[in-house]
Amino acid sequence: MAADVELYRDREQSFIKHQFLTKYLQAAAYKTLQGHSQTFNFVDAFAGPWKVSDEAKYSDASFDQAINTLEAVRADLGKNGVAGLKIRFCFCEQRPDAVARLREYAATKSRFEIHIFEGAFEDNLDGIAAKLPDGFTFTFIDPTGWNIRNEEVFRFLRSQGGEFMLNFMSDHINRHAEYEEVAASFGRFLADAQWAEEFVHLPSDWGNERKMLHLMKEAMRSHKIATYVPDFSIMVPKKERVKMRLILGTHSPKGLEVFRDVQEKVEKQEMEMRHNLREGDNPQISLFSAEDVVAFQQEQKGVGCKANRDIAETAIIDFLRGRSHAFPGPMFNIAMETVPIRRTQLNQLLMDMRQRGVVHFDLPARKRVPQKDTQIALA
């Protein structure tokens, strides 16, 4: 069941966040449960409920949407003959009043395997791991701030070996990154007590948020919890400012590809929602429909826009330098992680680069785009 945007009035950024989570979960579950694992584990590290409008069913809470999304995938695959599938849920929450509501909710969902953990996520990692003896684990980490002991969290994620999504609170971090009072908490967040030494040596034209995002991604790589760490920015609904970023951590090139596919769909929803909010504040007759505005904005700054295609082309050229040839996969992974661009758009980019004489490759008969074994070389 699709989420009702009306439940997110004055917190529309959470609607976009949940849209991205559920669409990615759906794709990840189909991918995992069809051959990779018969069990899919979902961990909500900061489950809430928190500022929900639907007090009866919690349909605007991440945990309810995760249950509905994953159960729908399991049921659909079951109808198509994929038997023996299992979904597990682990929900962690620190606030006692929210835990009580979470337990009441879980009692109404007795047909599902739901485990509730009370207290800080970091203090429950061993207990959560004990409930996940097998299967693929997806962990959703959506804190209200950044005072998290991530060194412990990273050990948990590394031991699970699945995927995770972290809500990186850009707006707050950008305004507090250089305050001495929060230096220790940022050290815990980045799993690096010496983070400030590297922070001051990053390019001076980078803003605080970009510096902290860079450090977080480097921490994820150095702790070996992810090979690819793409992110999706969610804007303050009525302002031109990034509110938060969803960072995916995955070792799978397929996960990276799905992330960018989902991003294109969800950014369209966000652009249309932001347009409608602005129109609501300043009603006027427009020559352009919401669809026209969104299409223009996507080509200006969305997934696969010209600016991102140009950066991707530079990444491909840099990758090919010094090589006699290369296959599309590795260079595509670099490009997709660097900027929002889809694999289909990268195929078209390579075709365009060949036409302009930048690269050279041969296509098999009746094929219109490079294949996984196509040898690409600089012209």
Image (spheres, helix red, strand yellow):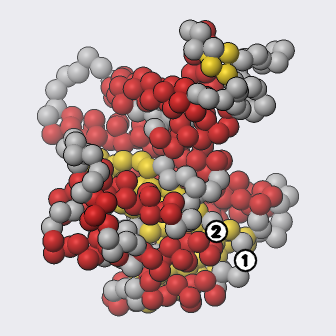
In the figure, residue 244 lies in which quadrant? Answer: bottom left
Tell me the quarter of the picture where residue 289 sits: top left
Toward the top, the furthest residue is: 356
Residue 66, image quadrant: bottom right
Q: Nearer the viewer, mark 2 or mark 1?
A: 2
* Image side of residue 362 versus residue 19, left or right: right
Q: Is residue 63 above or below residue 203?
A: below
- How busy is the neighbourhood of tag 1: few (under 14 within 10 Å), some, or many (20 plus)? some
- Tell me the amino acid under the disc marked 2: Gly
* Residue 352 horizontal/vertical position (percent): 58, 14
Q: Nearer the viewer, residue 365 or 270?
A: 365
- Residue 181 picture location, percent across and down: 16, 75
User: Crowding near pointer 2: few (<14 within 10 Å), some, many (20+)?
Assistant: some
Asked if residue 39 shows in the view, the reply is: yes
Q: Is residue 255 left or right of residue 86?
A: left
Q: Earlier in the sequence, mark 2 or mark 1?
A: 1
Quickly name the residue at label 2: 161
Between the residue at mark 2 and the residue at mark 1, the CA separation in whole angstroms equals 11 Å
Do tag 2 and tag 1 residues touch (Cβ < 8 Å)?
no
User: In the visual, does 375 lie left or right of 20?
Assistant: right
Residue 18 seen: no
Kind of element beneath mark 1:
loop
For residue 346, above or below residue 126: above
- The residue at the point 35 percent across, 90 percent down is 96
Which quarter of the image is occupied by the C terminus?
Answer: top right
- Label 1 sits on what residue type? Asp
The residue positioned 16% from the left and 32% from the top of the image is 283
- Where residue 377 sits: x, y (%)? 67, 22
Task: Give the image location of residue 90, x and y in percent.
Answer: 55, 79
**Secondary structure of residue under mark 2:** loop
- Residue that badge 1 annotates: 134
